[in-house]
Amino acid sequence: MTEGPQQRRDPVDAIIDQWAAVRPDLESRAMEVFGRIYRLSRAMGDRMEKAYQAYGISRGEFDVLATLRRSGEPHTLSPRQLSATLMLTTGGMTGRLDKLEKAGLLRRSPDPHDRRGLQVTLTDKGLDAVDRAVGAGLAVQTAALSSLNDEQAGQLADLLRVLLAGTQEAER
């Protein structure tokens, strides 16, 4: 690996070197990419969790509130729609909804169009919390991207989009 002025060695490089020493036959490019994606995900997940704690919510709870917020007025979805969007089981969703409802950040009510269904609606308190939390989360993410210029950040976003599409296509 050639090191340039912008390129420092990281823990993934050490892992790659170790594999090269014991298994020089392995092509390790995928390990380099996904090892770094995994480490970035873990590091950013921890940072995001801390940012959301200031608003009394976890990352998972933020996801529920943000999904309702992004749905637009009246910020209402069914538990099934939330579960599908967040790729959660109904049991996992119920636990999150219980906690958020108890905190006054959302409310559940009967669906007027389906007497067997429920609606989940963001409360004013929930709307305020998610709007403040999303700003705090974006500030953390923006700070993390500060080591890249705008062009590099755009290239990275484009490359990750291609990679994500390819992995999703391979799952089908």
Image: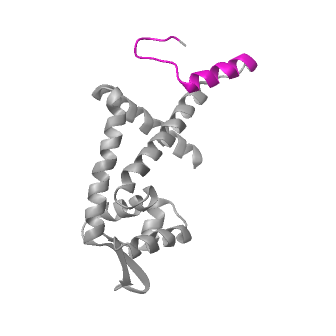
Q: Position of residue 88 (x, y in %)?
A: 52, 63
Q: Going 52% across and 46% down the picture, which residue do you hit?
A: 168
Question: In terms of depth relative to the viewer, which is nearer, 42 or 50?
Answer: 50
Q: How many marks?
A: 0
Residue 4, visible in the rendered structure: yes
In the rendered view of the protein, which quadrant contains the N terminus?
top right
The residue segment tinted magenta is 2-22
The magenta stretch spans residue 62: no
Residue 154, visible in the rendered structure: no
Question: In terms of depth relative to the viewer, which is nearer, 151 or 66?
Answer: 66
Q: Is residue 74 left or right of residue 84?
A: left
Q: Is residue 84 left or right of residue 34?
A: left
Please name the colour scheme applied to the rendered image: one colour
- Residue 158's quadrant in the figure? top left
Q: Going 51% across and 11% down the picture, which residue do you hit?
A: 2
Q: Is residue 87 left or right of residue 62?
A: right
- Residue 102's quadrant in the figure? bottom left
Q: Position of residue 135 (x, y in %)?
A: 27, 50
Q: Is residue 67 left or right of residue 39?
A: left
Question: In terms of depth relative to the viewer, which is nearer, 93 or 10?
Answer: 10
- In the image, residue 144 sits, relative to residue 106, either above or below, namely above
Q: Residue furthest bottom?
A: 115
Q: Position of residue 36 (x, y in %)?
A: 52, 32
Q: Position of residue 66 (x, y in %)?
A: 35, 59
Q: Going 42% across and 62% down the picture, which residue do you hit?
A: 61
Q: Going 57% across and 26% down the picture, which residue do you hit?
A: 12
